[in-house]
Image (cartoon, rainbow, N blue to C red):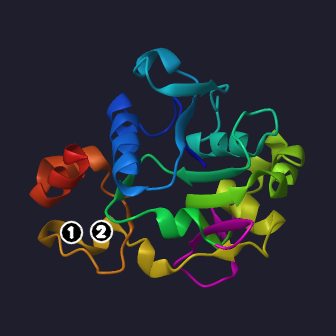
Amino acid sequence: MIVACVFVAGHVPYTPEYVVRLRAMVAKHLSLEHRFVCLTDQPRRLPADLTTLPIPGPGPLPGWWAKLHLFDRVQPLGDRVLYLDLDSLVVRSLDPIARYPAPLALVPHTGAVAMATRSGKRVVKKFNSSVMVYDRDTTYALWDAWRPAIAAELWGDQDYIGEQMPEAATMPEAWFPRVSSIGAAGQIPAEARVILSKKPKNLQCAAEWPWFDAIWRAA
């Protein structure tokens, strides 16, 4: 099992701490034998003992498009990959996610399954790619079919996946609550496994909420 993240210069000013903390949380909450790797355009900013795989920066595109390198067959990622966004907070075992019985499974989108637009680009409200688990050989087509012009038509990578592979499985939504739904009280739902810290991001949450800081920095 490979556990992967992506750390690139982009629209969100992530720091190396996000990568280091994520690796620690994965080690604590995944019992399966695994190797943690980071696809990045800035390996020198990361600890020397952390396995990095070089990818080009996203350039003018939002950083989330760099996630498509996860599906490039030249990347030495093995047969099965668990991917997590850097703004994740792992709170319970990742084993059910890693073992999810599907060749490709993502977080379900919280909205209705429908077409929409955002800033003039199409949004496919089907998947959230914050957490994904997949068999490599089922996703190569996502990389092979990718062209930069697609980013001019679709809002993000999860919209592209939703359009190209609408049959992909979704994991239980209750496993992935948003941090905004938990807030300062820190009452983590019983079924939660990975809290998605979209707004606010981890550093801000850790500075403002002791419960978040205790989990993120204690791993």
Q: What residue span does the magenta drawing correspond to?
A: 101-123
Q: Residue at x 51, y 29 (%)?
A: 9
Circle 1 — which element? Answer: helix
Rendering quarter of residue 103: bottom right
Q: How many discs appear?
A: 2
Residue 22: quadrant of the picture: top left
Residue 164 relative to residue 100: left or right:
right
Q: Residue 90 lies in magenta, yes or no? A: no
| Residue receiving disc 2 | 180
| Nearest to the observer: residue 33 or residue 161 | 33
Q: Indicate the amino acid at tag 2.
A: Ser
**Kind of residue indicated by mark 1:** Gly
**How far apart are the two marked residues, 2 and 1, measured between alpha carbons?**
5 Å
- C-beta proximity under 8 Å, tags 2 and 1: yes
Q: Which residue is mark 1?
A: 183
Query: Taking 122 as reference, is 195 left or right?
Result: left
Q: Which mark is residue 11?
A: none
Q: Nearer the viewer, residue 30 or 17?
A: 30
Residue pictured at 75% horizontal, 59% vertical: 160
